[in-house]
Amino acid sequence: MKVKAKLKNGVISVKAMAKHEMSTYNQAQKKTGDRENANFITHITATLKSSGETVLDMSTSQFLSKNPIFKFKFKGAEAGDVVLMNWVDRKGGTGKGKGKIKGK
Amino acid sequence: MQRRKFLNFTLGALALAVVPASVRAENFRETKPTVWTAHTVDDAIKAMFGSSETIKDGVKVKTQDVASNGGAIPIEFSTKIPAKTVALFQDANPEAAVCAYSVGKNDITNYSVKIKMAKSGTVTVVVEGLDGKLYSGSKTLEVALGGCEG
Protein backbone atom coordinates (compact mmCIF):
# COMPACT_ATOMS: atom_id res chain seq x y z
CA MET A 1 0.00 0.00 0.00
CA LYS A 2 1.35 3.38 -0.97
CA VAL A 3 0.91 6.27 1.44
CA LYS A 4 1.87 9.89 0.86
CA ALA A 5 1.36 12.47 3.60
CA LYS A 6 1.96 16.20 3.36
CA LEU A 7 1.70 18.87 6.04
CA LYS A 8 0.57 22.35 5.09
CA ASN A 9 -0.83 25.07 7.38
CA GLY A 10 -1.39 22.58 10.16
CA VAL A 11 -3.39 20.21 7.99
CA ILE A 12 -2.04 16.85 6.92
CA SER A 13 -3.33 15.61 3.56
CA VAL A 14 -2.89 11.95 2.88
CA LYS A 15 -3.16 10.21 -0.44
CA ALA A 16 -3.13 6.45 -0.39
CA MET A 17 -3.49 3.58 -2.81
CA ALA A 18 -4.20 -0.02 -1.95
CA LYS A 19 -3.39 -2.72 -4.45
CA HIS A 20 -6.47 -4.88 -4.62
CA GLU A 21 -8.67 -6.50 -7.23
CA MET A 22 -11.90 -5.33 -5.51
CA SER A 23 -14.07 -7.83 -7.35
CA THR A 24 -17.83 -7.53 -6.94
CA TYR A 25 -20.30 -10.36 -6.50
CA ASN A 26 -21.41 -10.08 -10.13
CA GLN A 27 -17.87 -10.11 -11.47
CA ALA A 28 -17.08 -13.19 -9.41
CA GLN A 29 -20.24 -14.85 -10.70
CA LYS A 30 -19.21 -14.14 -14.29
CA LYS A 31 -15.60 -15.21 -13.96
CA THR A 32 -15.77 -18.15 -11.62
CA GLY A 33 -19.44 -19.08 -11.52
CA ASP A 34 -19.67 -18.46 -7.80
CA ARG A 35 -20.58 -15.07 -6.37
CA GLU A 36 -19.03 -16.06 -3.06
CA ASN A 37 -15.60 -15.72 -4.69
CA ALA A 38 -15.97 -11.95 -4.60
CA ASN A 39 -13.21 -10.36 -2.64
CA PHE A 40 -12.83 -6.72 -1.70
CA ILE A 41 -11.38 -4.55 1.03
CA THR A 42 -13.86 -4.15 3.86
CA HIS A 43 -12.08 -2.00 6.39
CA ILE A 44 -9.24 0.52 6.22
CA THR A 45 -7.60 2.30 9.12
CA ALA A 46 -4.81 4.81 9.53
CA THR A 47 -3.03 5.57 12.79
CA LEU A 48 -0.24 7.86 13.87
CA LYS A 49 2.96 6.17 14.91
CA SER A 50 3.75 8.68 17.65
CA SER A 51 0.47 8.65 19.55
CA GLY A 52 -1.34 5.62 18.21
CA GLU A 53 -4.29 7.86 17.47
CA THR A 54 -6.64 6.74 14.70
CA VAL A 55 -6.94 9.31 11.93
CA LEU A 56 -8.98 7.35 9.41
CA ASP A 57 -11.55 4.67 9.94
CA MET A 58 -13.35 3.55 6.88
CA SER A 59 -15.65 0.61 6.21
CA THR A 60 -15.87 -0.12 2.51
CA SER A 61 -17.86 -2.17 0.03
CA GLN A 62 -17.18 -3.78 -3.34
CA PHE A 63 -17.90 -0.55 -5.17
CA LEU A 64 -14.57 1.12 -4.59
CA SER A 65 -12.55 1.07 -7.80
CA LYS A 66 -9.93 -1.54 -8.53
CA ASN A 67 -6.70 -0.54 -6.75
CA PRO A 68 -8.63 2.17 -4.91
CA ILE A 69 -7.09 5.56 -4.41
CA PHE A 70 -8.40 7.69 -1.61
CA LYS A 71 -7.56 10.92 0.13
CA PHE A 72 -8.27 12.20 3.61
CA LYS A 73 -7.17 15.04 5.86
CA PHE A 74 -6.57 15.53 9.56
CA LYS A 75 -4.99 17.87 12.08
CA GLY A 76 -2.78 17.53 15.13
CA ALA A 77 0.36 15.84 13.86
CA GLU A 78 3.82 17.07 13.08
CA ALA A 79 6.18 16.59 10.17
CA GLY A 80 8.34 13.54 10.63
CA ASP A 81 5.56 11.53 12.21
CA VAL A 82 4.51 8.42 10.33
CA VAL A 83 1.03 7.46 9.13
CA LEU A 84 0.50 3.71 9.41
CA MET A 85 -2.26 2.19 7.32
CA ASN A 86 -3.86 -1.23 7.37
CA TRP A 87 -6.59 -2.92 5.40
CA VAL A 88 -8.55 -6.13 5.75
CA ASP A 89 -10.44 -7.83 2.93
CA ARG A 90 -13.48 -10.08 2.80
CA LYS A 91 -11.42 -13.28 2.81
CA GLY A 92 -9.36 -12.15 5.78
CA GLY A 93 -6.34 -10.99 3.80
CA THR A 94 -4.50 -7.95 5.09
CA GLY A 95 -2.20 -5.29 3.75
CA LYS A 96 -0.31 -2.41 5.22
CA GLY A 97 1.70 0.62 4.30
CA LYS A 98 3.26 3.66 5.86
CA GLY A 99 4.15 7.18 4.88
CA LYS A 100 6.26 9.80 6.61
CA ILE A 101 4.61 13.20 6.97
CA LYS A 102 6.54 15.69 4.88
CA GLY A 103 6.46 19.47 5.05
CA LYS A 104 6.98 21.98 7.83
CA MET B 1 -17.12 -18.52 45.43
CA GLN B 2 -15.46 -15.43 46.69
CA ARG B 3 -12.66 -15.74 44.25
CA ARG B 4 -15.02 -16.36 41.35
CA LYS B 5 -16.91 -13.22 42.21
CA PHE B 6 -13.70 -11.31 42.35
CA LEU B 7 -12.63 -12.67 38.99
CA ASN B 8 -15.95 -11.83 37.40
CA PHE B 9 -15.74 -8.38 38.79
CA THR B 10 -12.23 -7.72 37.53
CA LEU B 11 -12.95 -9.18 34.11
CA GLY B 12 -16.03 -6.99 33.84
CA ALA B 13 -14.04 -3.96 34.83
CA LEU B 14 -11.37 -4.80 32.30
CA ALA B 15 -13.95 -5.16 29.55
CA LEU B 16 -15.36 -1.76 30.45
CA ALA B 17 -11.92 -0.22 30.45
CA VAL B 18 -11.25 -1.57 26.97
CA VAL B 19 -14.46 -0.22 25.42
CA PRO B 20 -13.55 3.49 25.12
CA ALA B 21 -10.53 2.68 23.00
CA SER B 22 -12.51 0.58 20.55
CA VAL B 23 -15.44 2.99 20.24
CA ARG B 24 -13.38 5.12 17.92
CA ALA B 25 -12.62 2.36 15.51
CA GLU B 26 -16.06 1.21 14.50
CA ASN B 27 -16.12 -1.37 11.77
CA PHE B 28 -19.56 -0.77 10.29
CA ARG B 29 -19.41 -4.03 8.39
CA GLU B 30 -19.52 -5.84 11.73
CA THR B 31 -21.78 -3.52 13.67
CA LYS B 32 -24.27 -2.86 10.88
CA PRO B 33 -24.18 -5.77 8.41
CA THR B 34 -27.58 -4.94 6.88
CA VAL B 35 -26.29 -1.67 5.45
CA TRP B 36 -24.09 -3.50 2.97
CA THR B 37 -26.81 -5.73 1.59
CA ALA B 38 -29.50 -3.05 1.20
CA HIS B 39 -30.50 -2.54 -2.42
CA THR B 40 -31.84 1.00 -2.34
CA VAL B 41 -30.23 4.14 -1.00
CA ASP B 42 -33.20 4.77 1.28
CA ASP B 43 -32.98 1.32 2.86
CA ALA B 44 -29.23 1.61 3.29
CA ILE B 45 -29.51 4.99 5.00
CA LYS B 46 -32.22 3.62 7.26
CA ALA B 47 -30.08 0.62 8.17
CA MET B 48 -27.11 2.87 8.86
CA PHE B 49 -28.69 5.72 10.76
CA GLY B 50 -32.14 4.50 11.78
CA SER B 51 -33.95 7.06 9.64
CA SER B 52 -33.77 8.18 6.04
CA GLU B 53 -35.02 11.71 6.66
CA THR B 54 -32.16 14.08 6.13
CA ILE B 55 -31.62 17.81 5.96
CA LYS B 56 -30.49 18.45 2.41
CA ASP B 57 -27.92 21.07 3.26
CA GLY B 58 -24.34 21.53 4.36
CA VAL B 59 -22.78 18.63 2.49
CA LYS B 60 -20.76 19.26 -0.65
CA VAL B 61 -20.32 16.54 -3.26
CA LYS B 62 -17.99 17.06 -6.15
CA THR B 63 -17.53 14.82 -9.16
CA GLN B 64 -17.48 14.85 -12.93
CA ASP B 65 -20.78 15.50 -14.73
CA VAL B 66 -19.96 12.80 -17.23
CA ALA B 67 -17.68 9.97 -16.22
CA SER B 68 -16.03 8.29 -19.19
CA ASN B 69 -14.90 5.31 -17.16
CA GLY B 70 -17.37 3.87 -14.71
CA GLY B 71 -14.66 1.71 -13.18
CA ALA B 72 -12.96 4.58 -11.38
CA ILE B 73 -15.02 7.69 -10.74
CA PRO B 74 -13.40 10.16 -8.37
CA ILE B 75 -15.88 11.50 -5.82
CA GLU B 76 -14.93 14.26 -3.42
CA PHE B 77 -17.13 15.20 -0.50
CA SER B 78 -16.81 17.55 2.41
CA THR B 79 -18.82 19.21 5.14
CA LYS B 80 -18.25 21.88 7.76
CA ILE B 81 -20.75 20.29 10.13
CA PRO B 82 -19.03 18.64 13.13
CA ALA B 83 -19.60 15.04 12.14
CA LYS B 84 -19.69 11.68 13.84
CA THR B 85 -20.24 9.49 10.81
CA VAL B 86 -20.04 10.05 7.07
CA ALA B 87 -21.36 7.55 4.55
CA LEU B 88 -21.42 7.37 0.77
CA PHE B 89 -24.19 5.71 -1.25
CA GLN B 90 -25.13 5.40 -4.92
CA ASP B 91 -28.10 4.01 -6.84
CA ALA B 92 -26.42 2.56 -9.95
CA ASN B 93 -25.19 -0.74 -8.50
CA PRO B 94 -27.05 -3.75 -7.07
CA GLU B 95 -26.24 -2.69 -3.52
CA ALA B 96 -26.28 0.93 -2.39
CA ALA B 97 -23.54 1.36 0.20
CA VAL B 98 -20.04 2.31 -0.91
CA CYS B 99 -18.17 3.33 2.21
CA ALA B 100 -18.65 4.73 5.69
CA TYR B 101 -16.24 6.73 7.81
CA SER B 102 -16.25 7.06 11.55
CA VAL B 103 -14.90 10.56 12.14
CA GLY B 104 -12.38 11.29 14.89
CA LYS B 105 -11.77 14.54 16.71
CA ASN B 106 -8.77 15.53 14.61
CA ASP B 107 -10.16 14.42 11.29
CA ILE B 108 -11.19 16.97 8.72
CA THR B 109 -14.34 15.86 6.96
CA ASN B 110 -13.00 16.19 3.47
CA TYR B 111 -12.64 12.88 1.71
CA SER B 112 -11.97 11.74 -1.79
CA VAL B 113 -12.37 8.24 -3.10
CA LYS B 114 -12.65 6.42 -6.43
CA ILE B 115 -15.73 4.31 -6.91
CA LYS B 116 -17.34 2.00 -9.46
CA MET B 117 -20.75 2.62 -11.01
CA ALA B 118 -22.47 0.28 -13.44
CA LYS B 119 -24.56 3.01 -15.06
CA SER B 120 -25.60 6.64 -14.68
CA GLY B 121 -26.97 7.45 -11.28
CA THR B 122 -26.89 9.60 -8.20
CA VAL B 123 -24.32 9.54 -5.43
CA THR B 124 -25.56 10.56 -2.00
CA VAL B 125 -23.44 11.48 1.00
CA VAL B 126 -25.05 11.37 4.41
CA VAL B 127 -23.44 13.03 7.41
CA GLU B 128 -24.48 12.27 10.95
CA GLY B 129 -23.63 15.38 12.94
CA LEU B 130 -22.50 15.43 16.55
CA ASP B 131 -25.90 17.07 17.17
CA GLY B 132 -27.55 13.79 16.15
CA LYS B 133 -29.18 15.20 13.03
CA LEU B 134 -28.68 13.81 9.54
CA TYR B 135 -27.48 15.96 6.68
CA SER B 136 -27.11 14.94 3.08
CA GLY B 137 -25.85 16.09 -0.27
CA SER B 138 -26.09 14.42 -3.63
CA LYS B 139 -24.97 14.69 -7.19
CA THR B 140 -26.26 13.04 -10.33
CA LEU B 141 -23.80 12.04 -12.98
CA GLU B 142 -23.75 10.28 -16.29
CA VAL B 143 -21.62 7.23 -16.79
CA ALA B 144 -20.58 6.62 -20.38
CA LEU B 145 -19.08 3.17 -19.87
CA GLY B 146 -20.30 1.04 -16.98
CA GLY B 147 -17.56 0.05 -14.59
CA CYS B 148 -18.26 -3.16 -12.85
CA GLU B 149 -21.25 -4.84 -14.48
CA GLY B 150 -22.90 -4.46 -11.10
Image (tube, helix red, strand yellow):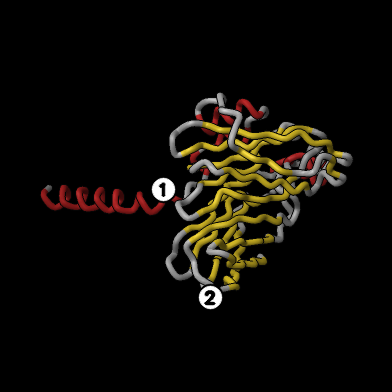
How many angstroms separate mark 2 from mark 1 (CA)? 28 Å
> Relative to residue A59, is residue B61 drawn left or right?
right
Q: Quadrant of residue A13?
A: bottom right
Q: Which of label 2 and label 1 is nearer to you?
A: 2
Q: Chain of mark 1?
A: B
Secondary-structure class at tag 2 = loop
**Residue B142 screen position, x and y as percent:** 83, 36
Q: Image point 50% across, 70% down: which residue?
A: A78
> Relative to residue A52, is residue A44 drawn left or right?
right
> Alpha-carbon neighbours of circle 1 within 10 Å: few (<14), some, or many (≥20)?
few
> Relative to residue A13, is residue B25 drawn left or right?
left
User: In the rendering, which numbered label is found on residue B4?
Assistant: none
Residue placed most toward the observer, A100 or A86: A100
Residue placed most toward the observer, B90 or B140: B140
> Alpha-carbon neighbours of circle 2 within 10 Å: few (<14), some, or many (≥20)?
some
Q: Image point 41% across, 48% down: which residue?
A: B23
Asked if residue A33 shows in the view, the reply is no
Q: Which residue is mark 2?
A: A80
Residue placed most toward the observer, A30 or A46: A46
Q: Amino acid at mark 2?
A: Gly
Q: Quadrant of residue A18?
A: bottom right
Q: Which residue is mark 1?
A: B23
Secondary-structure class at tag 1 = helix
**Residue A80 screen position, x and y as percent:** 53, 75
Residue placed most toward the observer, A71 or B55: B55
Q: Chain of mark 2?
A: A
